[in-house]
Amino acid sequence: MDEDSGAILRQISSFKNMIDQVNEEIEANIQTTRHIESEIIRCSELEKGYLIRESKLSEMVFNDEFELNGVLVATTVARNSLESTEEELNAMNSYIENMLRRIQEKREKFITQCEQFQEDIVSAETEELHELLSKKDALDNERQSLISKIDVLKHSTADFIEEALGEIISLTTDIDDLKNLICNLI
């Protein structure tokens, strides 16, 4: 019976060793499961961080697109303004040309009248001479005034066009910078 009890004790000891080994494997599996769960939590937190970052980047892209649209609208307005200014300048140049033509016609008429006056000088009165001379002075004064106004208009128009072109170039540079920034962000 001692042998049976020894065999039973050895078997119990063997079962205990097997149970201990199973328990160790279970404990190792529990540790592995805990490690996997902590990795899952860490990955979830990283995913949340990436989603937040993606949201911020999307917001930045939308803001940049909005600003770019604003710049495009401003550029369009500037172009329209420039075209309008050019049309006004052309109209003003046409007006000035017409005014100069009329002045030239008046001058020619005046010269013709002077020649007529010289032919009729014997019969003409002194009063008429004074009147024609004052008309000539008035026309010359008007001509000088118009030439001065034309020069002032040319200079101010050229300055305005130069300033508008500078702003358009600046806006174009800003647009290129925004495009580069968006390309870098993407």
Image: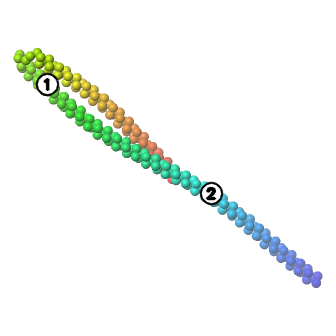
Compared to residue 56, the image places residue 41 above or below, namely below
The residue located at (37%, 38%) in the rendering is 164
Seen from the viewer's position, the closer of residues 85 and 168 is 85
Seen from the viewer's position, the closer of residues 88 and 166 is 88
Left or right: where 51 falls relative to 88? right
The residue located at (86%, 79%) in the rendering is 11
Q: Which residue is mark 1?
A: 110
- Quarter of the image that includes the N terminus: bottom right
Q: Which residue is mark 2?
A: 46
Q: Earlier in the sequence, mark 2 or mark 1?
A: 2
Q: Amino acid at mark 2?
A: Leu
Compared to residue 16, the image places residue 74 above or below, namely above
Compared to residue 5, the image places residue 158 above or below, namely above
Element type where label 2 sits in the image: helix
The residue located at (74%, 67%) in the rendering is 30
Q: Amino acid at mark 1?
A: Phe
Horizontal and vertical percent position of residue 144: 24, 24
Query: Do we see residue 154 in this rendering?
Result: yes
Horizontal and vertical percent position of residue 161: 35, 36
Horizontal and vertical percent position of residue 67: 46, 47
Left or right: where 61 falls relative to 38? left
Horizontal and vertical percent position of residue 88: 29, 38
Query: Do we see residue 180 in this rendering?
Result: no
